[in-house]
Amino acid sequence: MRRTLSAITAALGLLVPVVPAGATPDASHSTPERRAAALVAQMTLDEKISQTHTTLKGAGGIARFVPGIPRLGIPDFLITNGPAGVGTGAVPQQPNATALPAPVALAAGFDAGLARDYGVVEGRETGNVGHSLIEAPDVNMVRVYQNGRAFENYGEDPYLAGQLAVANIRGIQSQGVLAEVKHYAANDQERDRKTIHEVIDDRTLHEIHLPAFEDAVEQGHVAAVMCAYPNVNDAFMCENRHLLTDVLREQWGFQGFVQSDASATHTAVGSVAAGQDLELRDNGPYDEELRQAVVDGKVSMTALDAMITRRLATEIRAGLFEHPRTVTPIDAAAGGTVARRVAEQSAVLLKNSANRLPLNASAVHSIAVIGPYAGVAHPGGGGSSHVNPLYTVSPVDGIQRRAGSGVKVTSSDGVDTTAAAALAGSADVAVVVVGDVEKEGTDRPTLSLTGNQDDLVRSVVAANPRTIVVLNSGAPVLMPWVDQVPAILEAWYPGEEDGNALAALLFGDVNPSGKLPVTFPRTESQTPVSIPERYPGVNGTVVYSENLEMGYRWYDAQGEEPLFPFGYGLSYTSFAFSRLRVTPVLGRHGQADVEADVTNTGSRAGATVAQVYLTFPASAGEPPRQLKGFAKVFLRPGERRHLRFSLDQRAFSVWDSAAQNWTTVAGRYQVAVGDSSRDLPLSAPVRVSR
């Protein structure tokens, strides 16, 4: 005879006395873990199962929702997508929010303080819409430039991504909501993302693809980690016990909870055994499967309780039980201020022949703004991270407002190339705004601009040599016209303040100071993943055979000259580096202090990014140089600043797979300082012992 659910729970000892609403253990005499465990101990089996997966809430279809348990005082738990603001992926009817520039733009700022401010907006507005957690930041490496979600990431360097992630997480969590770092791990392409098998050696994982997650956990104290779709070394990530438990919890000491990507769970038993705590799903039988596994003894009650306890303890620790989130108005002005500052500080001046920029407002009488993104703002990429902006400012509107009524501003979408060229020829200056469209779920087929955009650029510059090209892209694009165009500005996906930020940069109200967080190649065949084995894969398998040589490490190791290197970016002023000093820290093996001066030698105020690179001894088997420190410095004309960087033991270490630990490599290192990976005027040796 089939037993009823109540009979099953009774047999398992799960029936509990009725508890008054809101009754919880005394918070003043209990740790978050003990409070959470006490609550879980009072749950029925049905209640426990309800806490292990998201569900739908109401007619609006909020899929990222875990219902509370009122009788135990457990509040609802609502999740919003990120990482460029409060995304629409969770709620089709999501209210408008600040559309921040894409995270890749934030990365181009090379500024941890800016990353924290960005996180404050994300966190504050997550709370404003009544949600508890935002799925941000996204710290996967930009290994594949065609990746449809490259715009969500922080570039191709693990140190840069890790430090920005730490600051971003601190900003988010300062607002009383939870941050969730994603997509753990190696979620590096959208093509076949739910089935792809990735073969990655252990050293490459730990030195390239895991450090940003490690920093998020150990330095940022991130509340949650999202396990990703791919199969990494024969285990899908949400069933990968080695990475979810051995590495995440045991090596790094992670104290939060693990949530799956949407429908990334394959089996209930496998995910529980690996260390997943919460399933995010569009629909599926996870709850029934998990319940049956508990009844059959395939998942122990101890394991089930631990899953729930970890999440509830994290919520309690963040104050979400005492201060559950409620819907409040969004401060549009505050969000817009940060969005504009990020857009201004992240734009990268790639070329400026004959100082075409900045524009002289008194000498320019007419401007033609041309291209598919001239009359319409291009705030961000597509997919679940899309934000419904509170407002947008197009390039045409921003330029007209800044130029004033005395300057004639005309525009064309560029569909008719001949007409666009004629319009450009009639103006003092032509600004061509072109770009790509990246979105979740699909990769770009090539790195070329789509449609007629390359022909449009050629036609416009032929008609008007005073042409400025503005790129709205989320990743590198090819530029077959680069030698013909005098000025190029990479503005990324610039958020809702698109036009205002662009105008400020073009007219010199703001001095460009962004640096490339990804290398721009000359051709697709020059990239590290230009063979099918590495991307998109062969027979469903991708082999990371470039190993440690990813991103700029590849170009350096192979002696390749990219179009624009990692860390590169021009300014309207000039800077000089001097007085490098590298000093080993006495009594601390494998540590050193690096000091240098940077001076603004030009006539305009501006900022640059001082970058510290380290070359290992040959015996270490490392790529030629690696970023180990950076600092954004704002200087007045003639001003000099003394900078100091501390390189800790980790900076001089490599991953020892056999020992499953970091080990310092003894020998002679070279420290170099400059403002890009290929412009390092200062260098000095330092000897390190174990």
Image (cartoon, rainbow, N blue to C red):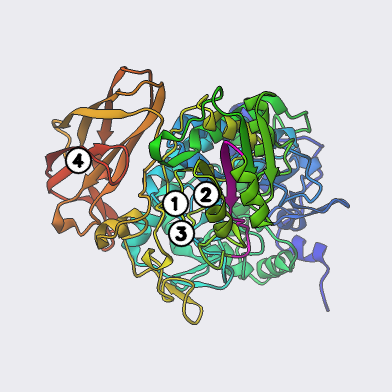
Q: Which residue is mark 4?
A: 671
Q: Which residue is mark 2?
A: 461
Q: Earlier in the sequence, mark 1 or mark 4?
A: 1
Q: Which residue is mark 1?
A: 484
Tell me what residue is drawn at x 47 percent, y 54 percent: 476
Cα separation between marks 2 and 1 = 7 Å
- The answer to the question of whether label 2 and label 1 lie on touching residues, with beta carbons closer than 8 A, is yes
Name the residue type under label 3: Pro
Q: Earlier in the sequence, mark 3 or mark 4?
A: 3
Circle 2 packing at 10 Å, graded few (<14), some (14-19), many (20+), is many
Q: Which residue is mark 3?
A: 480
As helix, strand or loop, the secondary structure at mark 1 comes to loop
Cα separation between marks 2 and 4 = 42 Å
Name the residue type under label 4: Val
Cα separation between marks 3 and 4 = 35 Å
Tell me what residue is drawn at x 24 percent, y 49 percent: 653
